[in-house]
Amino acid sequence: MSNMEQDHWTRVKGRLRSSVGEDVFSSWFARMDLEAVQDDSVHLSVPTRFLKSWIQAHYAERVLDAWKAEMPKVSRVDLTVRSAMRNVAPAKEVVPQAEPRRNEPASNRPAAELRSTATAPVSASHEALGGSPLDPRLTFASFVLGRANTLAHAAARQVAEGRRGDPVMFNPLYIHAGVGLGKTHLLQAITWAGNSSPDRKVLYLTAEKFMYGFVAALKTQTALAFKEALRGIDVLVIDDLQFLQGKTTQAEFCHTLNALIDAGRQVVIAADRPPSDLESLDERVRSRLAGGLVVEMGTLGEELRLGILKSRVAAARVHHASFDVPEAVLEYLARTITHNGRDLEGAINRLLAHSKLNATAVTLEMAEREVRDLIRPMEPKRIKIEDIQRVVARQYNVSRSDLLSSRRTANVVRPRQVAMYLAKTLTLRSLPEIGRRFGGRDHTTVLHAVRKIEALVGKDTTLQDEVESLKRQLAE
Ligand code: ADP
Ligand code: MG
């Protein structure tokens, strides 16, 4: 490669750095190399599959734009995973599988695969460390992939496959999703997989266990021992962080988090909301949590639900070989039980219990009867403050940063007030929280906006229409 090309590359990196900011740049682009420039295309490489898919999903256009700005003739950028040959110590590759395995339903996989043979010793030593109990069924082998969870799964695998001393790519890994969408499953899968290698210790704790462990340790004057134990682990996994409460616990959590991250240990966290919405946590902790990789898992699509059902049936068949659920029943369940993975699991358990107790085969009619109460009407969509800001900004043709800014011109003030009003009426967020999410405003400002719009909506029909239209867009 010519010096000139290297110079271009250096400047392209400079452009990227200033367009995405230093933090993002160092997380995702620091290990990107220029391989070649050929005619109108540029070949870049990164060390892992995960980086590749992440950059393609989130930054492909920016990378191309940066090149175009530097070399106008460039019209495409190819990104490849550097072959292990070039690296002294090849980075472990994550192989994210595409959409649900259409050709290979979970039920066709050998049942034995669903249970790791190494579960017993792993589980015993994990509990000896003070970890929360693990469910042997929650492994990577039984985790079904779909659009909603591909990224979270890829990141989880990356963490699970790391070795002691490997550089930590993102810290903490923070996974959030609603109830029953697979957070605990993924976290326990990391724990099982990580602990199956002898030189690694992965500790899985629920937030409650963390609190209880710490508080109990304080009482018995062994807080030091507890901290020591934490220091001896490579990966700390904390589930359901939204339950972490109390000032002392939080302070201790904050110390632990900082100590582990600074020591290059991996921290993985799951919660039912993004870090910015963990209202009871200190701002510093929140920003530390947001500083790693934050991944949301979406709702389970129908195909993913079908995959999960099949995986559950396969697991049940390990012990109940005669248990069989016709395809039509599985499809019916996947179509009608839309809420979450727990209800899917519940449905299979009921069919199993029913068919065992009555020694009858599972039929569609029986399934309809057994799971009737699991079929709930669609819950209204949970609306997020970001969605409100986005939709309002679009409707009034201002930018989202205008809404968050301190500008006071009329064309920004009104949309901002409408957005705050919608945030108050359509979400469960408190006034201070809304103020914070609108560029750090005081709760009285939010209250003022809410009252103002409430009063105007009664009189001003144009505004009323606008608000109605916004609500419709948000409900979509
Ligand atoms: P959360 O912790 O997010 O509330 P869980 O991890 O407990 O949810 O998942 C609820 C149920 O759904 C569990 O039985 C889990 O195994 C199942 N489940 C959820 N997502 C998946 C998935 N992608 N593959 C297989 N099972 C899943
Ligand atoms: Mg859970």
Image (cartoon, rainbow, N blue to C red):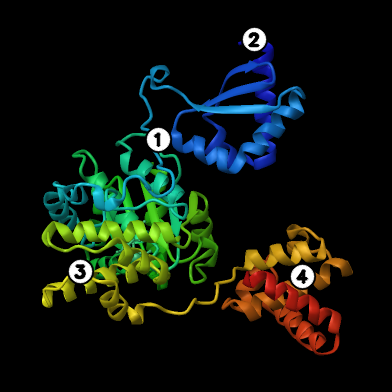
From the image, tell me which residue sits under label 1.
Answer: 167
From the image, tell me which residue sits under label 4.
Answer: 416
> Which dot marks residue 2?
2
Q: Position of residue 207 (x, y in %)?
A: 34, 66
Callout 3 secondary element: loop
Circle 3: residue type? Thr
Residue at x-position 27% and y-position 56% = 311
Q: Is mark 3 within 8 Å of ligand 2?
A: no
**Residues packed near mark 1 inside 10 Å, few (<14), some (14 to 19) or many (20 plus):** few
Left or right of 106, for residue 277: right
Mark 4 vs mark 2, CA separation in Å: 52 Å
**Residues packed near mark 4 inside 10 Å, few (<14), some (14 to 19) or many (20 plus):** many
Dot in front, 1 or 2: 2
Callout 2 secondary element: loop
Q: Position of residue 345 (x, y in %)?
A: 29, 67
Circle 1: residue type? Pro
Mark 1 vs mark 2, CA separation in Å: 31 Å
Q: Closer to the camera, 220 or 52?
A: 52
Which one is earlier in the sequence, the residue at label 3 or at label 4?
3
Which one is earlier in the sequence, the residue at label 4 or at label 2?
2
Figure quarter occupied by ligand 1: bottom left
